[in-house]
Image (cartoon, rainbow, N blue to C red):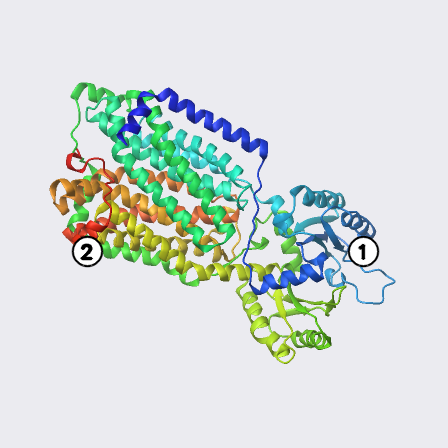
Amino acid sequence: MKSLARLCVRRRWIVLGSWIVLFIGINIASFSIGSNYSNTFSFAGTNSVHALHLLQGGFKSKSGDADQIVFDVTSGTLASHEKAIDATLAKIGKLPEVAIVTSPFCPTSSTSFCAGSTQMSKSGKIAFATVNFFKQAQYLKKSDVQAVVTEAETLRSSALQVNFGGNAFGQLTSPTGSPDEGIGLLATAVVLFLAFGSLFAMLLPLGVALFAIGIATGATTLLSHGLAIANFAPILGSLIGLGVGIDYALFIVTRSRQNLRQGMSVEDAIITAVDTSGRAVLFAGATVCVALLGMLILGFSFLVGLGVAAALTVFITMMASLTLLPSLLAFQKMRVLSRRERRKLAASGPEAALVQGGWRRWADFVGKRPRTLSALALLTIAIFSIPLFSLHLGLSDQGSDPATSTTRLAYDQIAQGFGPGFNGPLLVVGSIHNVSDKVAMRKLDNVLQGKPGIAKVSPVVLSPTGTVALITVVATTSPQDLKTSQLITALRDTYVPEVTAETHTQVFVGGQTALSNDFSNVLDSKIPLFISVIVILGCLLLMVAFRSVLIPLTAAIMNLLAVAASFGLVVAVFQWGWGSSLIGSGSGPIESFLPIIMIAILFGLSMDYQVFLVSRMHEEWVNTGDNEGAVIHGQANTGRVISAAALVMICVFLAFAVGGERIIAEFGIGLGGAVLMDAFILRTVLVPSLMHFFGKANWWMPKWLDRAVPHLAVEANEESAAI
C-alpha cells in the first residue's frame, strides 16, 4: 500500500488525468450506446410460468402485458362519450406492439356474450379498456407504450378523466431518481464541514464519491447490454456508492489529518493514512463486494445483474478512495486542516497521539458497565425488530404509488367501480387434449362460482386452435393482499385437484398477480441459503484479518441484529403504513427481492464499521496485550469518525427515501435505519461492551487454525503502529 500511495502522491497529475480520461471515456461510450435496463424476472418451472407458456401458445393476444385505460366522467354517464372512445380505441388497436384492445362498450346489435361487458361499472360512470400488448412490459419499448398514451390522452377533458394502469404504463411514470437527493448531499456537506472545520477537507470525500459514481453509472449502463439489470439499478448504485464512497474517503482524510496534526510531512501523512486506514478501506470494500456478489449463487438473472452492478459501483468508489483521493490530498497539502488547526500546529507543535475528550470518556464509561449497557442495547434492537414477525413479502402494485400519479388514480378508480380484485385478475389456464379436458374446465368454472374470496368467474374461453382453455377469476381482495395469495394457493391445492383428479387435465393459475406471488415464494425460499453463505464468508474474512474466532462470530450476530431491526423498521413504515404518507408512498407488501439485496448491502456496511473499529483495537492489542486498554483506545480513536460516517450515510440514504420510487424508498429507510442502529447502538455500545466482557478471549485462535489461516494484516505495521 505504501508504494501505491507514494506513486499517487508523487505522480498526482498523472493519476488525476487518468481518472478524468476514464470518466470522459466511459460516459461518452454510455451516452453513445445508450442503456438496456429491464426488470426481467426468470423463474422457470413455477405454476404461473407454465400458465404463461400455455397462453403464449394458445392466446397470443393475451400472453403479453395487459394494461388498462380507465375512463371516469365527472357528470352524467359514459354513454355520451362512447363514439369518441371507441374511435380512439380503434386507432390504438392498430399501433405497433398492441395485440388487441377490448372496449367497455358492447355493440348494440350484439346478442352474444361481449368480452368488454364486465368493464363498465354499474353506475355507468367508470369504465376501462383493456390493452393487450404482444410482449410483457419489460420487453416493450417505451416509445411503443407512449404512443398508446398519447393517442388516449386526446380524449381527456373537463368532463372525462383518462388514466392509465398496468405495468407497461407504470414504466413510463416511474421515477428515474430521487427528487430530494440534492438535499441529502447538502446535509452531508454540512456534516463533513462540522466534522472537519475545513471547506477543502469537506469537499474531498464528497467530490471523490460523486466523481466515482459518475464513472460507475456509465459503466453500469454499458454493462446493461450484457446482463439483465433492473431499471432501478442506477438509483440503487448511486445510493450505495455515495454512502460507501463518502465513508471510505472520510476515513482516509481523517487519518491523514490526524497524521498532519501529529507533525508528519504532507507526503508521509498521506502515505501513512493510505497504509493504515487505506488497508481497512480495501478490506471493507472487498467485503461489501463479496456480500453483493453472493447473490450470484441464487441463480436469478434479475439478482445477478443487480449484484454485479452494485459490486462494480463499490469497487470503483473504493479504488477512487485509494488512488484519486491521495493525489487530491497531495494537491491540497496543509489546507485539509482548518485555519485554526494550522495556527495551533504552528504555535504549539504536534499534538499527542492519545485521544482525549468526549469519546474517550464514553469509552471509559462503556468499559465500566459492559453488562448493563449490553442488556439495554439488546432490548432496543429487540423492540425495533418486533414488526419483522409480520413481514409479508410480495411485489407491491400500483395501489402503493403516489396518490396523484396516473397509475394510482387508475388503480383506485377500478377498485371503486368494480372492486379491488379487478386490478389483478387471475388466469386459470388448462391444456386441452380431448373432450374430457373440456368437460373438466367447464366443471371447474362452475365449482369456482361463489367460492370464498372470489368476486367473479368468467365463462370458459377456448383458444382458436382449441388446445388451451382460459377462465378469468377475479378476487374480492387487491392483488397485493395476503388473502389473494391464499386464494391462489386454494385454487392450486384444493379447487383444481378436486376437478381434475380423474381427467388429469393440466391446469395452471397464472396472470401478473400469480407471477408476482410465485416470484416472492421462490425468493423467500432462498433467503436462508443466502444468509448462511454470506455469514460464513464474512466470518472467514474477519478471521483472516484479526486472527480470532470470537470476533467474527460476534460480528455475524451483530450483522443479523442490524438486519432484523432494519426490516422491522421497513415493515412498520411500508407494510403497516406508519408515516408512509410523509414520503409519498402507500402501504403494501415488502418487495420480495428486497431482503436478499438489503441483507447483502447491510452485511457489507456492517463489516465496514466492524473493520474500522476492531482494526484500531487490534493495533493496540498487538502492541500492548492489554484487552481493556485496546478496546477503550480503539473506540476512543474511531468513535468520532464512525459517528460522522454514519451521519453521512444516514443523510444520503434518507434523501433517497423521499418522493422517489417506492422500491428505492424502502432501501433508503431500511439502510438509513440500519446504519443508525449499527453505528450508534451496536458499534458504540454493544460491540465494545461484549469485548470488555469477553476479555482476552476476543483474540484467541487455536494454534492449528492459526497455522491454516493465511496471514493478512489489516493494519500496516502492527509492531510499529503509532496508535
Q: Quadrant of the C terminus?
A: top left
Q: Nearer the viewer, residue 344 or 635?
A: 635
Q: Amino acid at mark 2?
A: Arg
Looking at the image, residue 397 sits to the left or right of residue 83; the answer is: left
Q: Nearer the viewer, residue 551 or 402?
A: 551
The residue indicated by pointer 2 is 371
Q: Amino acid at mark 1?
A: Ala
Up-down: is 424 above or below 620? Answer: below
Residue at the spot 70% in from the left edge and 70% down from the top edge: 432
Q: Nearer the viewer, residue 614 or 355?
A: 614
The residue indicated by pointer 1 is 79
Could one spot residue 419 in this view of the protein? no
Q: Quadrant location of residue 58?
A: bottom right
Looking at the image, residue 10 sits to the left or right of residue 292; the answer is: left
| Residue neighbourhood size for the residue with mark 1, other residues' Cα within 10 Å, grouped as few (<14), some (14–19), many (≥20) | few
Residue at the spot 52% in from the left edge and 30% down from the top edge: 27
Looking at the image, residue 111 sits to the left or right of residue 328; the answer is: right
| Residue neighbourhood size for the residue with mark 2, other residues' Cα within 10 Å, grouped as few (<14), some (14–19), many (≥20) | some
Q: First in sequence: mark 1 or mark 2?
A: 1
